[in-house]
Amino acid sequence: MTMQREQLEADVLIVGAGPAGLSCALHLANLIKQHNASGAKPELSAENIYVLEKGREIGAHQLSGAIMNPKALAELVPGFEKSAPLDTPVTDSAALLFTEKHSYRAPITPPPFNNTGNYVISLSKVVKWLGGLVEAAGVNLFKEFGGADLIYEGDGIAGVITEDKGLDKNGKPKANYTPGYELRAKVTVLAEGTRGSLTKQLVAKKHLDNINPQSYGIGIKELWDVQPGKIKPGYVAHTLGWPISTKMYGGGWIYGLSNNRISIGLVIALEYENSRFDPHAAFQTWKTHPFVRNILEGGKLVRYGAKSLPYGGWYAMPRNFMDGGLIAGDSGSFLDSQRLKGVHLAMKSGMLAAETIFEALKKGDYSANTLKLYKEKIDHSYIKEELWKVRNFHQSFRNGMLDGFFHSAIQQITGGAGLVDPMHAHAGHEAYKPIFGRPAPERFKGDGKLTFDRLTDVYHSGTRHDEDQPCHLKVQDLNICSTKCVEEFGNPCQYFCPAAVYEMVKEGSTLKLKINAANCVHCKTCDIADPYQIIDWVVPEGGGGPNYDGM
């Protein structure tokens, strides 16, 4: 029996109200307004642009390192300084090397760590502000709606089916059951963020992969209110070294916002050998360094969050156009892995998508032959200029930090080419080494003042899901979890998940996987880092997930 779904039709459907999706919607609405004012034909309407956002509020799911290059924003919103909620301009950029007891500041800040001209921001607040501009421009913005499935048509896509609402945990309709909508569009833009579930599906089905698989990192972050005088607004520091092994790629950050608030975090590449490495515990340990401890003492934890990042760069960028569809933002690998900056690139990709769609709407042609203009625009923009220089950067670190510094130095001299161009990479989950019967390490507990266990941190993420809804973490073969994965890798999901979602529990003489889906902060690490690639993250009922207000 075929389910009857209500159908809606739009000119443009944008999945994801982050920097890329909102920039696409706002720029397109502005282009349409100018077009109509000139009297040109055909007449177009911003009301035929739909934006879907799975969060319960615009900005609720926006977690960022919170440093923004304003160049794309200046193009999108001239005079943005008057109204954008930019917290403070960067006043000091520091590169710090941590040993266990000491910190050493580089006498000259390396160019990738220099943030002069950038802003320390709350991405959540900036996105909320952009959302207001988008709605004021006449665009239809739908909150608490996630894209569950793509509508395929010919060689491309023709829209999205949203998630069903009101199902119980067994998938049976409750009293408030509502089937998902069938939203059809001439052009669908996937701007879902890192490891977008629809983008993942589309790339696999249409074989859109580049020469390298995507590489990922996980960023774990806390927002603190600290004692006056501990840190100056606009102070930005990036740390290398302890407690991250030189065999791994990762580092920390400390960003000073206004009103004695700071953003701290640790980002780690998801391609390490130790299957029981715990990124959350590493971050909590990093906070005990004397330099960080001194800043945090007497302060208070305000918010917690985690997010995956696309590290792969230019050679991991999927083909981002097809009949009826474009891919933008983190979904399309628009992130500079050397500088760890992607907000301005995501915004620019959304704007270039808008310009491409505008031309398609005027022509009435939504084929790949027309939409390939998107790729051409990217190739002639500062997106390629920035990403081409670092096209082999992250691959250089696959054998650790020292090897990476050697290769990246040569790349700096050769404009990104290095000794091998292109430098190939493997999927990060392939790096795990078998545990060979080693006992499980003791889990990190925290002291409840400076350091915290994962459940305490999840509480501070504002995460909320209805307990009585289908699990959005689909495991294809639970038997692997209880047998093969126990023996080979010691169930890495218990360690890499920063939200205590996965837990192995004893039932009689066997271990069973318990999934605490209500804890999920939507970082997608499980979908990325599972060694057998049997975990599939799909959208939960709209409105569920974290609330990164102010982050």
Image: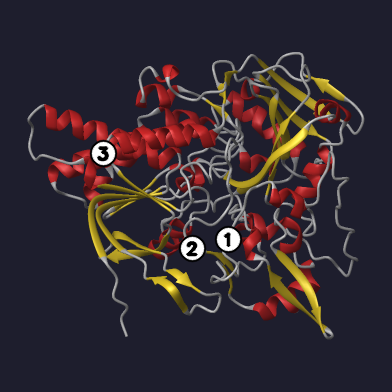
Q: Quadrant of the C terminus?
A: top right
- Sequence-earlier tag: 3 or 1: 3
Which kind of residue does numbered mark 1 sit on?
A: His
Q: Position of residue 106 (x, y in %)?
A: 77, 18
Q: On the rendered structure, is 354 left or right of 491?
A: left
Pick whichever of labels 1 and 2 is earlier in the sequence.
Answer: 1
What residue is disc 2 on?
541
For the residues labelled 1 and 2, the Cα–Cα distance comes to: 8 Å
In the depicted view, which residue is nearer to us: 526 or 303? 303
**Residue at image location 83% in from the left, 65% down from the top:** 435
- Mark 3 is on which residue type? Gly
Residue 202 position (above or below residue 348): below
| Residue contact at pointers 1 and 2, CB within 8 angstroms | yes
Q: Residue at x 81, y 47 (%)?
A: 452
**Gap in angstroms between the C-alphas marked 3 and 1:** 31 Å
SS state under label 3:
loop
Residue 539 is situated, as x and y percent measured from the top left of the image, at 49, 61
Residue 436 is situated, as x and y percent measured from the top left of the image, at: 86, 68
Dot label at residue 465? 1
Which residue bears the numbered disc 3? 138
The quarter of the picture where residue 504 lies is bottom right
Q: Do labels 2 and 3 touch, CB within 8 Å?
A: no
Q: Is residue 205 left or right of residue 514?
A: left
